[in-house]
Every structure is written in structure tokens, then in C-alpha cells.
């Protein structure tokens, strides 16, 4: 005959607590109660639990998109660098066109809140219209749209480093300073605010390098906009025959290649996954997140 189990009830199915388990539970409960009693016998108030903090909004990097496969690889590497700088932050990617994931799909699959940071270098149609419209089409999200990346001193840091990598001397003698110049090659836009932002970046870069920097465009959409070859000729007419082309593009593509091919001397690589670019994305994210009110897309500044 099999002896009965002393830790089961009469039906033999429900486990019963052992004496040790009962004593452990009583001790635990008694300890919890004693924490509410002071040494003089008076009852303490129950300890307050720390309030729960809401999770940080996701950072949605908004790329333009490109048919060049190098562009997606470059943006992906940049996002990985952002994640390294801010561990724990949710970072997603969405494209305006040409590449997946599209911004609309990224927002449709997101929850909670998000800050959309344009991976664009100035104000223009995409910043003022396309991105805010995509955010408005995701009413389930609490969204903010950050300013574009440029102009900003961190961009100048990246531009300078890319020029040095291409062969720009770290120190210019007086003779070189009189004969050197730089063309800041950008994509181009019909929006005058975009041209203003590019000119401001050119001015900042000129101060850093100590030589003239002329903004020029792969797509000359206005009569006053210079193409890269025209800007090279304009500098040569001023005695600046040693001219470099600074690639003012976030990633490789047709426009960046076209502009580099027009360089009479050296041409820098696109800004890409430079550490300053990752820091600037986070700066735009933090600034937009800290803003007390959402800013209208038409009021976006790039300070």
C-alpha cells in the first residue's frame, strides 16, 4: 500500500504548503507590516512609489530615398551610429519616396509618440508639406516634426572632415589661401528658404576654411542658381584656380556623382554616416521634443 502524501489534501489533488513555506510567508508579511511601524510604536505612512515615466518618443529619421543602393546602406549605417550614441532610444527609418520602408508605412506601424527628423539639409517642399502631411495621416500617433539638419555648425564639421579626407590641406599657406576656393554642391530646390539655408552653410564653411565658398546646385531650378561647372568658372575668374567641390549631400546618388565629376581638383564624399551627422539628428530630436508647442511646418527654422 502506497503511503499518503502529507502535502496533499484529502482528495489527493491540491498541494498543501509545508510548515517551512507557511513560516516564510508569515515572516515576509510580518516584515512588510513592521516597516510601517516606527520605533516608538506609531504607524508610518506607506512609502510612495515613484511615478512611472512615459517612454521617450521614437526618433523617426525621414530620408528622401534614392535608386542608388549605396544611399540606403549609408542611411542605415547612420542610424546605427545614432543608436550607438543613444542606447535604448527607438530609432526608425521612413522614406519619402523610392525606398522602403516608406514614411507612411513606418508611421502606420508605430505606436505612442514620435519625433520626425528630416534627413534633409534645408527647408523645402518635403519639409514643409510632405513630412507634415504624412504625420497628419497617422492620427493614432502623437507626432512632432523637427527642423531639417541645416544649416548648423555640426554640418560644417562633417563637410570639413570630408574635404580633408579628399586631400584638402589641414593648413593653407598664404599663397594657397589666395588661389583656393570651394564649391558647395547641393541638390537644389525651388523654395527660396532652401537656397537661404544653403548659402548660410556656405558662409559657415568659408569662415572655417578661410577661402571663398560658392553654393551651387545639381538642379538649377531658378535663374539665379549656379550649376557646379558655372560656380567653378566663377571662382576661376576671381583667380581661384585650385577649386574643390564639397558634396552637400547626405548619401551617394546621381546628383552627388554628377557634381563630383565637375570638380577640377578634389571632390569630397557625401556627409554619410559621419559622427557629426548622428549628433545633429539627436540634437534636432531633442530640440523638437523639448518644444512646448508643435511648430507649424511653415515656421520651421534651422537654427
Image: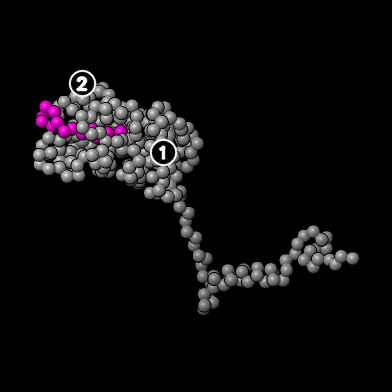
Q: Tell me if 174 is positioned left or right of 248 in this view.
A: left
Quadrant of the rendered image containing residue 161:
top left
Nearest the viewer among 61 and 116 is 61
Nearest the viewer among 223 and 237 is 237
**Residue 18, numbered circle:** none
Q: Give x and y (percent) for residue 105.
A: 47, 32
Q: Is residue 267 above or below residue 285?
A: above
Segment colored magenta:
236-249
Q: Do we see residue 47 in this rendering?
A: yes
Image quarter hosting the N terminus:
bottom right
**Residue 223, numbered circle:** 2
Number of marks drawn: 2
Nearest the viewer among 76 and 109 is 76
* Gap between marks 2 and 1 measured at Cα: 36 Å
| In magenta segment, residue 223 | no
Quadrant of the rendered image containing residue 126:
top left
| In magenta segment, residue 243 | yes
Q: Give x and y (percent) for residue 106.
A: 46, 35
Amino acid at each position: 500500500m502506497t503511503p499518503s502524501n502529507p502535502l496533499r489534501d484529502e482528495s489527493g489533488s491540491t498541494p498543501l504548503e509545508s510548515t517551512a513555506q507557511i513560516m516564510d510567508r508569515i515572516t515576509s508579511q510580518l516584515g512588510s507590516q513592521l516597516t510601517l511601524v516606527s520605533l516608538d510604536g506609531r504607524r508610518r505612512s506607506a512609502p510612495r512609489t515613484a511615478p512611472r515615466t512615459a517612454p521617450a518618443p521614437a526618433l523617426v529619421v525621414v530620408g528622401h530615398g534614392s535608386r542608388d543602393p549605396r544611399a540606403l546602406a549609408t542611411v542605415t549605417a547612420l542610424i546605427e551610429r545614432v543608436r550607438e550614441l543613444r542606447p535604448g532610444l527607438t530609432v526608425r527609418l521612413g522614406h519619402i519616396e523610392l525606398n522602403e520602408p516608406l514614411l507612411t508605412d513606418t508611421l502606420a506601424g508605430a505606436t505612442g509618440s514620435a519625433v520626425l527628423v528630416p534627413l534633409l539639409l534645408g527647408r523645402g517642399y518635403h519639409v514643409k508639406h510632405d513630412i507634415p502631411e504624412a504625420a497628419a495621416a497617422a492620427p493614432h500617433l502623437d507626432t512632432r516634426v523637427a527642423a531639417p539638419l541645416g544649416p548648423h555648425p555640426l554640418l560644417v564639421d562633417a563637410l570639413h572632415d570630408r574635404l580633408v579626407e579628399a586631400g584638402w590641406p589641414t593648413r593653407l599657406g598664404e599663397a594657397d589661401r589666395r588661389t583656393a576656393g570651394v564649391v558647395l554642391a547641393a541638390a537644389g530646390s525651388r523654395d527660396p528658404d532652401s537656397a537661404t539655408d544653403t548659402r548660410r552653410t556656405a558662409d559657415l564653411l568659408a569662415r572655417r576654411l578661410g577661402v571663398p565658398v560658392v553654393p551651387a546646385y545639381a538642379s538649377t531650378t531658378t535663374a539665379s542658381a549656379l550649376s557646379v561647372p558655372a560656380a567653378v568658372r566663377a571662382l576661376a575668374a576671381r583667380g581661384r584656380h585650385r577649386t574643390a567641390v564639397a558634396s552637400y549631400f547626405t548619401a551617394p546618388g546621381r546628383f552627388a556623382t554628377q557634381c563630383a565629376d565637375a570638380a577640377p581638383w578634389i571632390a569630397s564624399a557625401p556627409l554619410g554616416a559621419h559622427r557629426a551627422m548622428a549628433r545633429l539628428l539627436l540634437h534636432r530630436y531633442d530640440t523638437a521634443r523639448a518644444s512646448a508647442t508643435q511648430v507649424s511646418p511653415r515656421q520651421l527654422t534651422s537654427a
